[in-house]
Amino acid sequence: MRLLVLGGTHFLGRHVVAAALDRGHEVATFTRGVSGAPPAGARALHGDRDDPAALPAALGGWAPEAVVDTSCQSRAAARNAAAALGDVRGYAFVSSLNAYAGWPPGPIGPEDGEPTWESDAEEYGPVKAEAERVLAAAHPGRFLTARAGLIAGPFDDVDRLGWWLRRIAAGGPVVVPDALDQPIAAVDARDLAGWLVDAAAAGRAGAVNATGPAGMTTLGGLLELCREVTGGDARWVPVPEEELLAAGVEPWVHLPLWLPRETARTAWDVDTTRARELGLPSRPLRETVADTWAWLQTVDALPEPPHGLPRPGLPRELEAVLLAVR
Ligand SMILES: NC(=O)c1ccc[n+]([C@@H]2O[C@H](COP(=O)([O-])OP(=O)(O)OC[C@H]3O[C@@H](n4cnc5c(N)ncnc54)[C@H](OP(=O)(O)O)[C@@H]3O)[C@@H](O)[C@H]2O)c1
């Protein structure tokens, strides 16, 4: 099958390309060509998807049969893909739980009963929600939107888990939120990638909460895996939420994956029944953590986080302030 990957040179997109090549598909990627190349074996097409003329020009006579879209971050990008790719037999789109109006917090029940954003705001969630609508209308009955939660694994340039791994490997006292029992869920990028390829090839339709099963782990469980995998002598120094916030520690950013108590209580209470019915795998989290650590050992310079996201991590001076009083 001829598969077009919109994206394909970074984290999730790279794994999509690898999974598609493994399955014997003929693969082309479409990116601007400014931030990397796809894995060997894929044909690299170039252009800016915000430009309506770029994708048709890059495709030339090559007619994809299915699409996996990992790179949509604007309304124009969705409109242009809808116009250029209306006749494919399957379109799998990477959206986000942020497409749900008001998430986080949750809980998020079955997909069809949950409202998504209806807003003109140029923000991540509303843009993903609008992109879903535009692309679904162009591919009736053959458009699947994967509302991803936290994606983790090798090649993760967002670097939330990566920062924890490096910090914990460095050892010594490590500031952690005192709410280590807060639930968290993640999907391995490789599990999601292979499943997206198969969904596009099969022309599957509908919305799917594409994240790990509710209750799969806690923040403390994940950090413990980081300690085991890196083998360091890190010692947790739990700090109460009020103190973290008062010191200017930004949830999710300075202490990646940490959410304030009230949000965390339900944020990862997401119904993934449909994902499981449709065969989205969920490999052991230890494997995700270990493979991300192994990949980090091979990286000389960390790639820039994508689409303007801040580099996560607790600034050393903030960490020193919090440790000094303990
Ligand atoms: N990380 C998470 O935990 C998380 C959670 C929920 C959802 N998501 C979603 O998951 C997806 C992750 O995708 P990803 O890791 O494969 O990659 P990504 O970082 O979102 O996408 C980057 C890719 O898109 C290309 N690109 C960027 N702007 C472009 C443009 N204007 N025209 C054409 N190509 C463009 C880039 O290549 P060039 O720079 O060379 O153009 C690169 O290949 C995203 O859609 C994200 O919103 C992520």
Image (cartoon, rainbow, N blue to C red):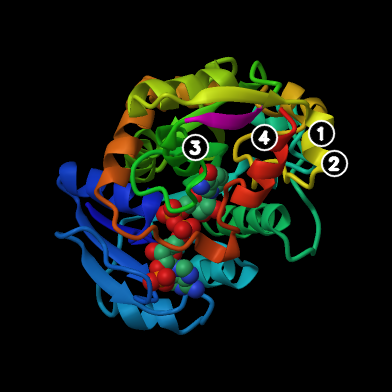
Residue nearest the viewer, comparing 89 with 287: 287
Residue shown at 67% from the left, 57% from the top: 124
Residue nearest the viewer, comparing 131 with 88: 131
Residue shown at 60% from the left, 36% from the top: 257
Residue shown at 75% from the left, 32% from the top: 325
Please tell me how crowded label 4 is: few (under 14), some (14-19), or many (20+) other residues with Cα within 10 Å.
some
Disc 4 from disc 1: Cα separation: 12 Å
* Residue highlighted by disc 1: 243
The magenta span reads 172-177
Residue shown at 30% from the left, 34% from the top: 291
Disc 1 from disc 2: Cα separation: 5 Å
Of labels 4 and 1, earlier in sequence is 1
Magenta-colored segment: predominant secondary structure: strand
Disc 3 from disc 4: Cα separation: 17 Å
* Residue highlighted by disc 4: 323
* Residue highlighted by disc 3: 164
Is residue 236 shown to the viewer in this render? yes
Disc 3 from disc 1: Cα separation: 20 Å
Please tell me how crowded label 1 is: few (under 14), some (14-19), or many (20+) other residues with Cα within 10 Å.
few
Marks 1/2 in contact by CB < 8 Å: the verdict is: yes
Element at label 2: helix
Give, as a three-letter code, the residue at label 2: Ala
Disc 4 from disc 2: Cα separation: 14 Å
Q: Is residue 168 magenta?
A: no
Element at label 3: helix
